[in-house]
Structures are given as structure tokens and as C-alpha cells.
Image (cartoon, coloured by chain):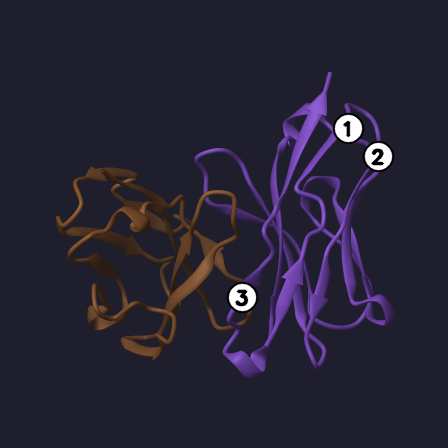
Chain colours: A brown, B purple
Amino acid sequence: EAGVVQSPRYKIIEKKQPVAFWCNPISGHNTLYWYRQNLGQGPELLIRYENEEAVDDSQLPKDRFSAERLKGVDSTLKIQPAELGDSAVYLCASSLGQHEQYFGPGTRLTVT
Amino acid sequence: AQSVTQPDIHITVSEGASLELRCNYSYGATPYLFWYVQSPGQGLQLLLKYFSGDTLVQGIKGFEAEFKRSQSSFNLRKPSVHWSDAAEYFCAVGAESSGDKLTFGTGTRLAVRP
């Protein structure tokens, strides 16, 4: 069974440019999470989806970040415009709603 | 609010030696507790989890952890470390009441001496 797939794995952009990350969860997993992991820190939740509904986006900086999960499967996280402080690893995870989350390899974003 | 403390930022052990990584959590009710491992450039892999029942849980790769409610701890142990265990280890706490939101500690980086 394929795990959580994320792309791209690495992205380098200049500040003020837009960027998007894509996540394909494990087949059948109805819950999808986006986390941000700053250097030397643990992951922090940005947004959680139950199917196509965002049920917890309290930590998402809504002035520049947006996310969608059309049809309750794949998800896209966007930043527009990017700032230097957005440099981090963006992790996607999915679960069947039974507490155990499976993580993808992440997208490492560098904003210059 | 739930929180996790991993007091050791870096730990170095010799190959074959025993290992214990500390984790303390703060949460009002019985939490769900997890240990994840992250190798460089990789995502997080679940080592083990505690939901309820037996307080000593076994995980993959020979790891185990013990939930101690009185000490609010969930320390990770391994009797004999292998060089391939070098990685970063994260303790996390979740709860059904918060929609299974995971709160992670800052991680402990493990180095293994040959």
C-alpha cells in the first residue's frame, strides 16, 4: 500500500512569490493534516480536514496561507506571498480517524 | 492546553548500549501518547503508541515505552542501540477531545558512537 505522497520534495523561491504544495493521502483515509516543522522543532498543526471540510484551521495564518481538499482526497496548501519566515518543512499526514497519523516525506521550502 | 517536554536536545550513546529518551506531557485527562522517529530528509515514522491498557507498550525496531501517570511521563527505551538508530525522536500527545490534534515535543537528536 502506498504511503502519503507529497510533492515537490524541495522548493526554493524568492520572497513575495507564491508557492503550492500537494498531498495525496493514503487511500481511504478521511482525515488529512498539514503541519509545519521549523528547523530544530517538532511539527505544528496548520489545518485538519475531515473529508473535504476544514474542521480545525485555527493555526493557519489566513492572510497568506490557504488550503483546499477537493472531493475529500488530495489536498493543496498555498502560500501567497511567501515570506522569509515561511522557510520550513511542510508535512502532510492522514489517518482513518483512529488517532494514528501517517506522515509523508514533507516538502522543504526555502524562501530567499 | 496539552504540551510535551523533551528535556534532552542531544544524546550520544555507544552502539550496543542501552537508551532512554525522556518525555513529559501536560494534559488534564488520559492522553494518547506517541513516539515518532525522523531520519534526515524523511517524514515521521511511528515507533509506538499508547491509548489505554497495559502501560508498557512495545513498538517497532525493538523500542518500548512506559506510561507513568503519576510522573506524567512516557519515556522511550531500547536495550541495545544500533548505528541505524541515529535519528531525531519526537514524543507527541493527542486527545480525542481535541480532534486527535497532535502536539509534538521539540525532539531529541540521537547520535550513536561506533
- Measured as percent of width and height from the top left, residue A6 is found at 31, 48
For this rendering, which residue is in front, A91 or B7? B7
Secondary element under disc 3, as helix, strand or loop, is loop
- Which residue corresponds to the image point at 65% horizontal and 70% vertical from the top-left? B32
- The alpha-carbon separation of the residues under discs 1 and 2 comes to 8 Å
Mark 1 and mark 2 residues within 8 Å of each other at the beta carbon: yes
Q: Which residue is mark 1?
A: B13
Q: How many numbered markers are drawn?
A: 3
Q: Amino acid at mark 3?
A: Leu
Q: Nearer the viewer, residue B30 or A66?
A: A66
Res. B102 mark: 3
Mark 2 secondary-structure assignment? loop
Residue B1 x/y as whole percent? 59, 77
- Of helix, strand and loop, which one carries label 1? strand
Q: Earlier in the sequence, mark 1 or mark 2?
A: 1
Q: Do the residues indicated by labels 1 and 2 lie within the same chain of the protein?
A: yes
Chain letter behind tag 3: B
Q: Mark 3 or mark 1: name the one nearer the start of the chain.
A: 1
Which residue is denoted by mark 2 in the rendering? B18
Along the line of sight, the residue nearer the viewer: B89 or A75 = B89
Q: In the image, what residue type sits under mark 1?
A: Val
Looking at the picture, how far across and down is residue B67, in whole percent? 80, 63
